Image: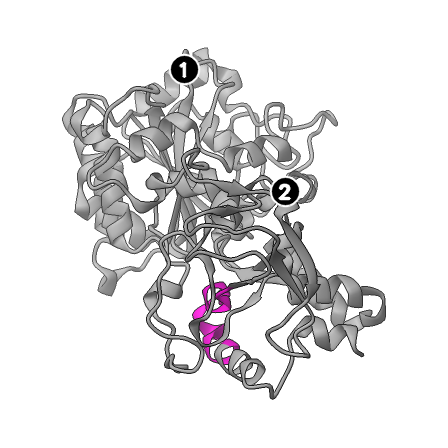
Amino acid sequence: MFAHANVQRVAIVGGGEGATLREVLKHKSVQEAVMVEIDEEMVSISREYLPEWSDCSDFEGSSDWCGNDRRSTIFYEDAVQWFQKRYLDTENIEDDLFDVIIMDAIDPNDNNEFSDVLYKSNDYLTSVFNALSEDGILVVQIGESPAHDSPAELNTTFKNRSILIEILSQLGFETMHVYGQNHGGYQATWNNLLVSKSVKTRSRWFRNAAEINLQISQGLVKSKSGSPLLRYFDGTTMERFQVPGRDVENVFCRQAPVPDECLYRGFNPQIPNFNAGNFEVKQSKISKSAGRGLFATVDIPKGSYISAETAGHTVHFKPSTYALLEKMEMYVSSALDAVYFYMHGYGVQVHHLGDKSNVVDSSILTFMNHGCNGTYNHAHLGQSYEFNEFTADDSEMPEEYGEDRSVYNPALDRNTPFWLSSLDLTTRDISAGEELLTNYLAFVGHSSDWKDDILDLRAQCSGQDVGDVTTYETQ
């Protein structure tokens, strides 16, 4: 719910005990909450014997029973048929779309026909996809978290979970994240899957605790008693959800073929590292106007880490911070010039969080210049390009330069900071006194920036222009 900017219409699949409906109705932006539950008797029994699960009596403007809230609509029907009847045929959708759909049904490892339909039916899952708005979010409870030694899930009783993730990836969802929670009273960590039709959901999913707490304070209905409506959830809780469990990552990485991101998790102790004391910062030799550069003071063999102990010390301007600085620079530029030019001059623009953000090396690595005409001697592990800024086609960004990632990738979610800054190696032997150069083409954050960045590098490499840092420091 908090990962969406403005939740107005919500559907709940199952949830007969009423607790999910109760939590949805805590959000004041919600205009309608539709619950589709096949078992009317279960709803009645839960209302009688578990009244606190569906108790909305403390919500201002609500009812004693959440099902009687003016925003609640309950259908006692088979949810699979309900969705397929209304949303399978895209040419005949007459019902309103949902901003959030929550599948609060049986577990994917349950051995019965209904479980197979919920987690493996293309028609049903296509209907759910069609029922969501353009930036709609699907949340699925996917059962107990795997054990640390569990095999790939296609080989286990949790195969439905793996099949579900594959089907959702193929339907057109753009981002998917697993998160586990331990306070529900279960014997083990229970996992949920958040899936969105818009990659921009990532920028809200990866917000910091303060931003989420602000949304909580502004977005919930008031209680009659004055007591907080959320007892087990706050910004810090949601921030923890951003990093999936190691067990989820391990199972993901045991599939065949092994995803590339799983091959490079953490530093390789067999690769030599040359610490920061083996380098010095002084005037660059690539041109008179290049500013500072990074130089080796010892011989360094090909395939070595450069200052690995500081590589992860980055300053990350997340999307909301980036957008705020961009906006403030327009109106109070003199007060923010230094920060703004630090972010853009020394930083690398990335889009891995769903929108523009910048990452700046806070170590001496930030003084590494671009190697014009393919003369770089330092690059991201596995990167090898057959063209440079002069020979590249500036009209289209090659696939290998983009930040394309699979829709579902818990290995990357767990190791993003490492991937952004700690996988760089020397591409050839470097002699003492030689300047270290990297490939700035690899730093182009998005295809929309490709042409401008190519033209900027061409101008700098031909001596017709200088970089942002030199421009700022000579103003």
- Where are the magenta residues, as a range? 438-453
Q: Position of residue 239 (x, y in %)?
A: 58, 36
Residue position for label 1: 188
In the rendered structure, the answer to whether residue 195 lies left or right of residue 464 reads left
Instruction: Assign a secondary structure to mark 1.
Output: loop
Residue carrying label 2? 208
Along the line of sight, the residue nearer the viewer: 81 or 354: 354
Q: Report the residue at 22% width, 21% height from top.
A: 110
The answer to whether any part of residue 223 appears in the image is yes
Q: Amino acid at mark 1?
A: Ala
Q: Residue furthest bottom?
A: 464
Camera-side residue: 95 or 188? 188
Q: Earlier in the sequence, mark 1 or mark 2?
A: 1
Measuring from the top left, give residue 20's x and y in whole percent: 46, 30
Q: Based on the picture, tell me whether residue 326 belongs to the magenta stretch.
A: no
| 80 to the left or right of 295 | left
The dominant secondary structure in magenta is helix
Q: Residues within 10 Å of mark 1 (few under 14, many from 20)?
A: some
Residue 46 vertical position relative to residue 387 in the rendered view, above or below: above
Q: Position of residue 340 (x, y in %)?
A: 73, 65
Residue 273 percent location from the top left of the image? 51, 41
